[in-house]
Amino acid sequence: LAQFKALDIHWHYWTFKAIKNYMFPDGVYSYGANDPWVNRAGPDSGWDSWARLWPTHKKQMIASWRTEKFSLNALIVKEIRDAC
C-alpha cells in the first residue's frame, strides 16, 4: 500500500466480508465458524457444499450472513487506516 501511495496509484480493499479459509482473503469482517456449509476440512467446500446443503440448511445459512456473525479484522483495518 505504501508503494501505491508513493506512486499516486489509487487502490481499494475489495473484500469487506469474507469467510476465513485457505482459498479466500481475509476481509474487514471475517467469518470464522466452521459450519457444515463452510466445511474447511472438505471433501467439498465453498460453493459445492453450499449447493448441497441449501435445501436443508437454508435458514441457518442466511442467518450466518448477518454482520454480527463476523469478527472485525483489526489488522486489516489498521493497515488500511495507516495507508490512508
Image: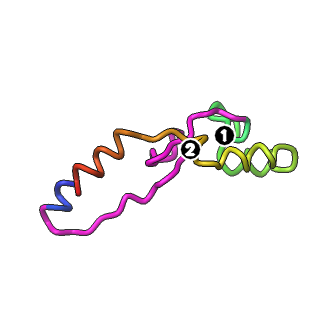
The stretch in magenta equals 6-35
Q: In the rendered structure, are the residues bearing label 2 and label 1 in contact, judged by CB atoms less than 8 Å apart?
A: yes
Please tell me which of labels 2 and 1 falls first in the chain.
2
Q: Amino acid at mark 2?
A: Ile
Q: Residues within 10 Å of mark 2 (few under 14, many from 20)?
A: many
Magenta span includes 76: no
Residue located beneath label 1 in the image = 38
Q: Residue at x 51, y 38 (%)?
A: 71
Instruction: Locate the C terminus and report the quarter of the image it occupies.
Output: bottom left
- Residue at image position (49%, 46%) is 29
> Where is 14 relative to 42, above or below?
below
Q: Camera-side residue: 69 or 51?
A: 69
Question: How packed is label 1: few (under 14 Cα within 10 Å), some, or many (20 or more)?
Answer: many
**In the image, what residue type sits under mark 1?**
Val
Q: Nearer the viewer, residue 4 or 64?
A: 64
User: How far across and how far down the image is residue 10, in percent?
Assistant: 26, 69
Which residue ends up furthest to the front in the rendered image?
Answer: 68
Per the rendering, the mark at residue 19 is 2
Can you give x and y, in whole percent of width and height, for residue 9 in the image? 21, 68
Q: CA distance from mark 2 to mark 1?
A: 8 Å
Q: How is the image coloured?
A: rainbow
